[in-house]
């Protein structure tokens, strides 16, 4: 299985936000994350980086900039 | 290996844009994609959807909307 873990990067530190993420869908009011069990979380953030071989999704909090 | 294939979705159709993508980095002037061999492509697009278990990255051409 090629799910990834989603981390929230703030002030140079990364904290785990959600594990075993399958789907990532950017929407108008945030990013929808869905794990392999179908559980969903929404976060007002943007994708900073994906490193799929390392199973990492890095998110950064949306600070209102374009 | 958990790389994915990147597809460009246009008019409801999906065309392969890059295979074996490892890293995806949204930047000011587009999305940088890097495959497992370190080869890079840049595309003026946005991430429409990730489906990691299916190894799929769906991109949509940036049409100037926010």
Image (spheres, coloured by chain):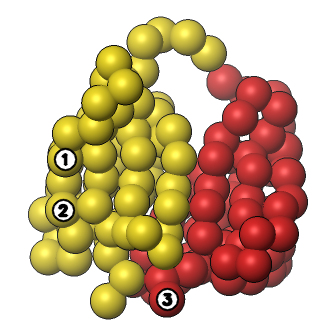
Chain colours: A yellow, B red
Q: Residues within 10 Å of mark 2 (few under 14, many from 20)?
A: some
Q: Residues within 10 Å of mark 1 (few under 14, many from 20)?
A: some
Q: Is residue B54 above or below residue A46?
A: below
Q: Find residue B41 and report its image quarter.
A: bottom right
Is residue B38 shown left or right of residue B22? right
Disc 2 element: strand
Q: Is residue A30 above or below residue B59?
A: above
Q: Position of residue B42 (x, y in %)?
A: 85, 52
**Residue placed most toward the observer, B37 or B10:** B37
CA separation in Å, label 2 and label 3:
18 Å
Answer whether labels 1 and 2 touch (C-beta < 8 Å): yes
What label sits on residue B3 in the rendered view? none
CA separation in Å, label 3 and label 1:
22 Å
Image quadrant occupied by the C terminus of chain B: top right
Is residue A23 shown left or right of residue B54? left
Q: Position of residue A57 (x, y in %)?
A: 40, 54
Inspect this view and state whether residue A2 appears. Answer: yes
Answer whether labels 2 and 3 touch (C-beta < 8 Å): no
According to the picture, the residue beneath numbered tag 3 turns out to be B1
Question: Looking at the image, which residue is at 73% across and 64% down?
Answer: B34
Q: Mark 2, mark 3: which one is toward the viewer?
A: 3
According to the picture, the residue beneath numbered tag 2 turns out to be A19
Q: Find residue A4 and report its image quarter.
A: bottom left
According to the picture, the residue beneath numbered tag 1 turns out to be A16
Disc 2: host chain: A
């Amino acid at each position: 299985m090629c799910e990834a873990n989603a981390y929230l990067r703030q002030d140079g530190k990364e904290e785990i936000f959600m594990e075993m993420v399958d789907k990532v869908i950017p929407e108008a009011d945030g990013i929808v994350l869905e794990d392999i069990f179908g559980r969903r979380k929404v976060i007002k953030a943007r994708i900073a980086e994906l490193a799929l071989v390392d199973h990492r999704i890095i998110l950064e909090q949306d600070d209102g900039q374009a």
